[in-house]
Each structure stands twice: as C-alpha cells, then as structure tokens.
Image (tube, grey):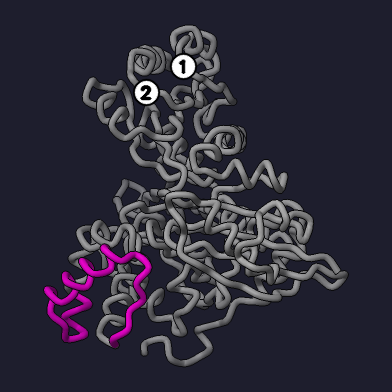
Amino acid sequence: MKTVISVDIGSTWTKGAVFSLTGSGLELLDKISAPTTQSNLVVGFHEILARLLQRDRNTPLDQLKGLAEIFFSSSAKGGLSIAAIGLVPDLTLQLARLAAMSAGGKVVKSFSFSLTASDVNELEKLRPDIILFSGGTDGGNSKYVLENASKLESSRLDCPIVYAGNRAVAEDVINIMKSREVIVTENLMPEIGQVNIEPVREKIREIFLKRIVVGRGLSEIVELFGSQPKPTPLAMFELISAIPEFHPEWSDLAAIDIGGATTDFYSNTESYLETDTVVLKGIREPKIKRTVEGDLGLRVSAHSLFETSQVYIKDRLREAGFEFQEMNEFVGKISGRIDYLPELEKEKIFDRVLAEACVYYAALRHIGGWRQIYTPQGKIYVQTGKDLRRVKAIIGTGGFLSEEKTAAVMSIPLEKLKHYGEEIKLLPERPAFYHDRHYLFPLLGNLIEKYPQEATSLAVASVENLSQRGDEND
C-alpha cells in the first residue's frame, strides 16, 4: 500500500485528502480543509499536510517529506490572470480566450484589432501574469500584429508575452519586442477554421511553473517535495477530459465549480452537430471547453456577483417572499467575512440564491445558441458557441455544490435560461444532476497525469445522483 496526498490551495479554503493506493485503486482515507493563509500560502499547506499525516502541526515541513507522495494545486490570490490580444473577435480572439481558460487561466481582459493608448493603459493597470498575443493565419494579416507588438514594447508591462499568431512575422515580433520576455509557440489558427490550442496551453503551464509559483509563495513546497503544482482549473480540466476516456458511459459530461472567487463551467461534448438546417458562425469550439467567470463567486466576488445578477436575484427573492434589501445586507456580511458559513435558515436561502445566480450566468456565457433566419431555401438556424443539448450528466463541485443535497441549485437556473432572449439556447435536454459529495474533483485532478485510471474511477464512484432523490425542487 502506498500513501498519496493531494492538496488544493483555493482562494478561500485550502483542501487536502489522503488516499491509499493499492492494486484495486485509490481509497479515500481522510479529507480536511482550513482557511487559506493568503499572506503565506505555505502555512496553510503545512497545516493541512501535518493533519493528514496525523502529525503535530508544529512538525517542521522537511520532517514530513517522504511520508507520502505529494501532489498540489493552487488558485489562491485570484488564480492565473491572462490578458488576451487577438485580431477578429469571432476568430483569433475567441480562440485566445479558449486557450487561456483551458490552460487554467482567468482572462481578465481581451482586446481585438489594433491596441489603443487607453487599451495599453488598462493593461498596465491590470498587471496580468501573462499576455497571450495572437492574430492572423500563417502568412495572413500582419499589420495589426506588428502594430500591437510595437505598442507592447513601449509599454510599462513586465509580464511574459506568449506569441501564438501569424508565424510569418514571428521573428519580426521578437525583434520589435527586444526588451520583453517573448515566448513563441505555434499559431492558434494557422488556417481559417483550424484550431490549434494545445501548444499554447503547454507554454502557459510552463510559465506558471517557472515564474508564477515564485510569485504565489509556493517555491518552498516545490523545492522540498519535488512536486510541481497545477493551476486548480487545469487539474479540473484534465479530470473532466479523462473521465469519458476511461469510463465511456460518462461521455457527454459537464461540470460546474462554484468557488469563493470564480465560477468555472466545463463541458466535454461535441460542440456542433452538422445538419442541412444549421450553419455555424465563427469557429468550431473544442470538444472539451472551460469558461471561468471572475465576477461570479460566493465570497471573494460576492459584491460583483450581486451587481451582475440583480435581475435573477430579484426574481428569485420575489418567488421566495424575501426583500431585496435583506439580500443586500447578507452580501455585505459575507464579503467582509469570506470564511463565513450561514447559520440562520434565511441566510442559507440567500446563499442558495447566490449559488443559483452563479450557475445561471456561468451557463449563459458558456452555452451557445441558435438564431433563426429565412433564406430562399427556407428557414435555417445560425449557431454561435457550443451545443450542449447532448450532455447527459452535470456534476456540481466546489464547496457549495458539493454540500448541496438537491439538484435545484443547478436545475432551476438552467430551466429559467430556456426563456432568455430571442435566441434558442442549446441547453442540455434531459441531464441527470450529480454532486461531488466529498469535494474530491480538484484533488483527483492533481493525480491525473500519474494515476489516470485510479483517479477517474474514484471520481465516478464518489458522485451522487441528485436526480434520483426526488427532491430537486425543495
């Protein structure tokens, strides 16, 4: 038997689990959590590790080495912030955003065509961890790429710049940005309609390991245990990618992860079903997709969530018989105490409505739609974004959804989305709702590279089908 420990350092809580690894797979032995120590992430990690190994909390970190195989991830301090620069919003810029998010990053701002002086000024104020710079097919448009390279060179930015644009001018871009750290990789879209995300994902991960780890205070853990961290969303992305590979019955899968700072939506299903009556506008999105919403979170981002989702919140409070001002006071309370857990029944209802709003707006931004148009040949549908109609299972994870015992927090907002606007939303048609009842998904995602069969098997064994409980609308 081998002991394996996985730790995830989140924006609000640091979680950890210890597993035994035997010939029959992984078995969960214990799982604990503690508030994330934002000033020094290693302190919280140290506490979690000592408790999982049943050692005194004051045991020096180096004395815990060798007692287990250690894996860890982090999304603390807001995660990996990426600014995306593309050419055409519907093509290269959309691809840049998809690539950044699939690598575990949070896109803090995106820009298309030629950067203006105010754009550069905004970039300098945002201070992203990475700039993903793309645009033009190979041998195609170079005008905007070279203009933007010059503007980035003359800026006060000091972060790495990943160039994934027109390969024909890659050397010119490097020569223009002589004072910048420029990492060149393959073009995100070498030809119109051709999607090439993987090389960009790998470069972003390399930067995270080499530079961002130091900035997050995690280098001590890396040096001591020889274990490289992952951005938490990348761990989740890899788990959602691997589950259908090892368990085909879980094909056409989606997952919603509500955290304190962000809400992440993952889908693993074909994005476009070709028919004579449906035409795709823009790129064909990848089968495995992640979107992340930095304004949707239950604690760190509670104020921005409240501002974003007031229409939805007012509607749900009216149905539940509560006043809007009461919710306003609750949001002020939890924003000042990000580790606060509701005690009163009224507060629990408010927290549930906020979680519903996270699901509603995260799904709205992730899922594609059809717009009807009429041609001489008859009515057709123009599709933008991703088609999720074939999704059979939706898994809720994150602190709130893992604890939630009914499907209502996910099913009610998705049902309400059917009536959003004039566009037909391509929502899952008859999904079963599950929850990650032990909140293991991010922790199992850390193990995917080395133990994919074992991690995916425990993942599917640990979810609970909420649709079978018969109390979805409680």
Q: Are marks 1 and 2 in contact (CB under 8 Å)?
A: yes
Q: Which residue is mark 1?
A: 180
Q: State the quadrant of the N terminus.
A: bottom right
Residue nearest the viewer, comparing 202 with 376:
202
Residue at 44%, 84% in the rendered image: 406
- Badge 1 or badge 2: first in the primary sequence: 2
Q: CA distance from mark 1 to mark 2?
A: 9 Å
Residue at 37%, 68% in the rendered image: 339
Residue at 70%, 74% in the rendered image: 28
SS state under label 2: loop
Give the residue type that dot 1 points to: Arg
Res. 152 in view: yes
Is residue 216 placed above or below 430 in the rendered structure?
Answer: above
Residue nearest the viewer, comparing 213 with 180:
213
SS state under label 1: loop
- On the picture, is 251 further left or further right than 339? right
Whole-percent x, y for residue 66 in the image:
79, 56
Is residue 207 placed above or below 421 in the rendered structure?
Answer: above
Residue nearest the viewer, comparing 314 with 5:
5
Q: Main secondary structure of the magenta part?
A: helix
Residue 4 sits in which quadrant? bottom right
Q: Which residue is mark 2?
A: 157
Whole-percent x, y for residue 410 in the image:
41, 74
The magenta region covers 315-344
